Image (tube, rainbow, N blue to C red):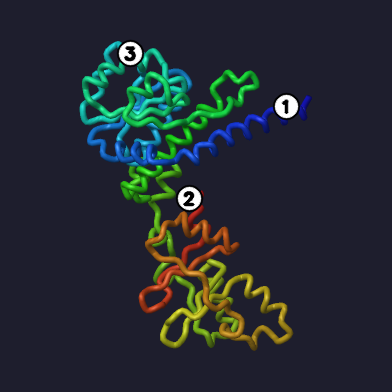
Amino acid sequence: MTARLLELAERVLRIEAEGILGLIPRLDAGFLKAVDVLQRCRGRVIVTGMGKSGLVGRKIAATLASTGTPAYFLHPAEGVHGDIGMVARDDVVLALSNSGETDELLAILPQLKRLGVPLVLLTGTPGSTLAKQSDVVLDVSVAEEACPMNLAPTSSTSAALALGDALAMVLLELKGLRPEDYAALHPRGTLGWRALFKVADLMHTGEAVPRVSEDAPMGDVIREMTNKGLGVTTVVDATGRLVGIFTDGDLRRVQLRKEPIVTVSARDCMTRSPKLIGRDELAAKALQLMESLAITSLVVVDDAHRPAGIIHMHDILRAKIV
């Protein structure tokens, strides 16, 4: 019985994935026209749909709004009872209807036509009544629903949601939305934290930056690392330029050498060409780089290639950037 349940779950995921992948060959001039209509919108994008399509529409509206495209959801059943008054002439309507025959959407269609607002339709039935009345039709049909009875909206809603995300992300790119702009729309939570903090906000600077000369004996190197408490020290030449870095890992490797540790200088065992990061880079990018390289610190240099700061993984984690 357990194996059967897992097989069913796997079938659902596979069918839904295939439904989404099936949209890729349909990314054509129609998709680009929809993007153009949405980008040119001088008002707001009004997303509408009934039932499961309506729930997907709410998510699409939220994604658009959070990525720089003003949008809100209009329940079509409420629309025929007065809420259609929220739609203005400068708006664009993005409607979802798998059948293309949704009564509530057809009921508000005359008012939308009177306002002259463009109508972009995501539908599984390109030849439907709604499709014939739309300015842009995006085909989100799927071969089958993931429901074992082929009834419950599953693959079709996943496909519509994915194409809605595709529209939102393309619009985000065209608008040139920056991480700090995105953060301004998410002032609470880790989304805002991740996007707002830059390396310069968290890095150690000035006297807090561990620094030894390349001629420094190992005793001085260990003392500097201990005093600064970052598990690392930069190594500089006579002009103060960064020439290397010495880490706890380097210290362990030195101890495995045959020669006495007191006879070794920083130059003899430092890691040359250390990994750097710019002060204006996002702290989230610094964390990703550290994780990919399995290191805990990155060095920031100034225009003369002198150590200007060090950012440690713990600094980023303390800022709740995870």
Front of the two marks 3 and 2: 3
Q: Say which label, 3 or 1, has the lower sequence index.
A: 1
Q: Position of residue 2 (x, y in %)?
A: 77, 27
For mark 1, what is the residue? Answer: 5
Residue type at the position of mark 1: Leu
Q: CA distance from mark 3 to mark 1?
A: 42 Å
Residue type at the position of mark 2: Ile
- Residue 193 relative to residue 41: left or right: right
Label annotation for residue 249:
none
Q: CA distance from mark 3 to mark 2?
A: 48 Å
- Residue 121 relative to residue 286: left or right: left
Q: Quick one: label 3, few (<14), some, or many (20+) residues within 10 Å?
A: some
- Which secondary structure, mark 2? loop
For mark 2, what is the residue? Answer: 321
For mark 3, what is the residue? Answer: 107
- Which secondary structure, mark 3? helix
- Residue 49 relative to residue 216: left or right: left
Q: Say which label, 1 or 2, has the lower sequence index.
A: 1
Q: Quick one: label 1, few (<14), some, or many (20+) residues within 10 Å?
A: few
Q: Say which label, 3 or 2, has the lower sequence index.
A: 3
Are the two marked residues, 3 and 2, in contact with CB atoms closer than 8 angstroms?
no
> Residue at the location (28% across, 30% down)?
92
